Image (spheres, rainbow, N blue to C red):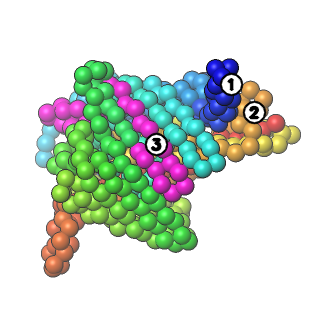
């Protein structure tokens, strides 16, 4: 009896292992990028957000994401009409840097995705972005304002996502500063989505993050609530309306995703944004970019046998400060073993992908309420880029 039981356990284990996918386009591969930010209007010009970013896949299921920043001030150099020039000296800090262990269990009817991140973390999307995540509160700027409050997570975060057809359960646990006595539930909710031709529907219900509308500090409180979204999709564009009720606090929102066009490609290349909190245009121009241990051109005489699709995202919250980066592995097909293939990276242009507004105003009885909704709204934005890792034999 015990022998049969052990054989059964062994067979189940073999089946489980055969369905586990630990993503890695190629061991010791990734990229490095240096960029600089610029904020200007008729009365000022600010140099800011000097940064070096890197992403490195160590081996299957293990990667390092890091970003070093010029200093712990909003601006590096300030030139204004009514003030003397101000220069804040270089004093590099680690803006984000974490080791991630992640993987997927894939079956015909369900998926189990898990990620464990340890370090300084600013962006939590996993396994990939949803429509509602466009309205999520992302890490902001409180750590570089006068009070220097944390705007990211420091510790370990375990993210689990279980999906079956159009339903899923998502859970995030945060061990703050690696203290075993200080474990925080960031969220735990059920979600569903439905796409039919041009119609998009999505909803969440459970323990959702409680917003602190006037703060850039990272969110650590969750409470029972729900949120829902309805939108239309047409020729690469989509527009969505959003409603959220968490802890009896109601928010409404609107988001627009832009199709690829010369304008969105130019804005994505310059990483351009316009903001009103400190009025002006924002650029985060890439000065240097280099892929690591990856080819960029199709090898002569070889045939494509597989691919891994990914999506890169840069999210920003206030005054266009682009500090949050992630690469989500979306899908795979064919042969994706780098030991027996040649790996080529193919990058589509970065786009000014998604502009959103989320506001605590939800009653609209007169026209002034629309202006109030707009003035009190916060505008999260996302730059997106599709990446394909192609495999040739």
Residue 392 occupies quadrant: top right
Residue that label 2 marks? 342
In the rendered image, the residue lying farthest to the right is: 301
Going 65% across and 36% down the picture, which residue do you hit?
A: 19
Residue that label 3 marks? 161
In the picture, the quarter occupied by the N terminus is: top right
Proximity of marks 1 and 3: CB atoms separated by less than 8 Å? no
Q: CA distance from mark 3 to mark 2?
A: 32 Å
Residue 103 occupies quadrant: top right
Going 51% across and 32% down the picture, which residue do you hit?
A: 102
- Find numbered disc 1 in the image and state the secondary structure of the residue it sits on: helix
**Image height check: is 371 above or below 64?**
below
Decide if residue 357 is on the left or right side of residue 24. left
Q: Along the line of sight, which residue is nearer the eye, 39 or 107?
A: 107
Going 82% across and 36% down the picture, which residue do you hit?
A: 393
| Residue 163 place in picture, x, y as percent | 50, 48
Give the class, few, some or many, for how many residues have Cα within 10 Å of label 3's Cα (few <14, many ≥20).
Answer: many
**Image height check: is 164 above or below 95?**
below
Q: CA distance from mark 1 to mark 3?
A: 33 Å
| Residue 82 place in picture, x, y as percent | 13, 47
Q: Which mark, by number, is residue 4?
A: 1
**Image height check: is 48 above or below 199?**
above
Give the class, few, some or many, for how many residues have Cα within 10 Å of label 1's Cα (few <14, many ≥20).
Answer: few
Residue 266 seen in the current view: no
């Amino acid at each position: 009896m015990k022998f049969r039981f052990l054989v059964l356990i062994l067979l189940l284990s073999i089946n489980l292992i055969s369905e586990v996918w630990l993503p890695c386009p190629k061991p010791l591969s990734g990229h490095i990028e240096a960029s600089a930010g610029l904020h200007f209007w008729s009365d000022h010009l600010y140099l800011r957000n000097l940064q070096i970013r890197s992403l490195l896949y160590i081996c299957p299921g293990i990667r390092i994401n890091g970003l070093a920043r010029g200093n712990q001030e909003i601006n590096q150099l300030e030139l204004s009409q009514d003030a003397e020039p101000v220069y804040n000296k270089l004093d590099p800090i680690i803006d984000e840097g974490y080791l991630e262990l992640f993987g997927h269990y894939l079956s015909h009817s369900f998926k189990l995705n898990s990620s464990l991140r340890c370090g300084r973390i600013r962006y939590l999307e996993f396994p990939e972005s949803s429509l509602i995540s466009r309205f999520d509160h992302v890490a902001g700027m409180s750590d570089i304002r006068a009070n220097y409050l944390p705007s990211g997570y420091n510790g370990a975060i375990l993210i689990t996502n279980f999906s079956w057809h159009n339903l899923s359960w998502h859970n995030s646990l945060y061990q703050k500063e690696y203290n075993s006595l200080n474990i925080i539930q960031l969220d735990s909710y059920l979600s569903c989505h439905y796409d039919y031709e041009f119609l998009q529907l999505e909803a969440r219900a459970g323990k959702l993050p409680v917003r602190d509308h006037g703060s850039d500090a990272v969110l650590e409180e969750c409470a029972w609530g729900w949120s829902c979204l309805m939108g239309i999709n047409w020729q690469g564009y989509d527009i969505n309306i959003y409603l959220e009720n968490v802890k009896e606090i109601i928010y409404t929102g609107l988001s627009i995703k832009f199709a690829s066009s010369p304008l969105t490609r130019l804005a994505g290349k310059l990483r351009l944004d316009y903001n009103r909190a400190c009025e002006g245009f924002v650029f985060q121009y890439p000065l240097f970019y280099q892929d690591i241990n990856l080819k960029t051109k199709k090898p002569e005489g070889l045939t494509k046998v597989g691919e891994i699709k990914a999506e890169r995202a840069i999210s920003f919250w206030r005054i266009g400060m682009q500090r949050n980066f992630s690469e989500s592995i979306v899908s795979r097909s064919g042969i994706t073993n780098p030991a027996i293939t040649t790996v080529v990276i193919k990058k589509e242009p970065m786009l000014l992908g998604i502009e959103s507004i989320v506001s605590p105003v939800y009653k609209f009885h007169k026209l002034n309420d629309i202006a109030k909704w707009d003035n009190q709204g916060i505008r999260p934005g996302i730059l997106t880029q599709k990446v394909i890792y192609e495999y040739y034999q």
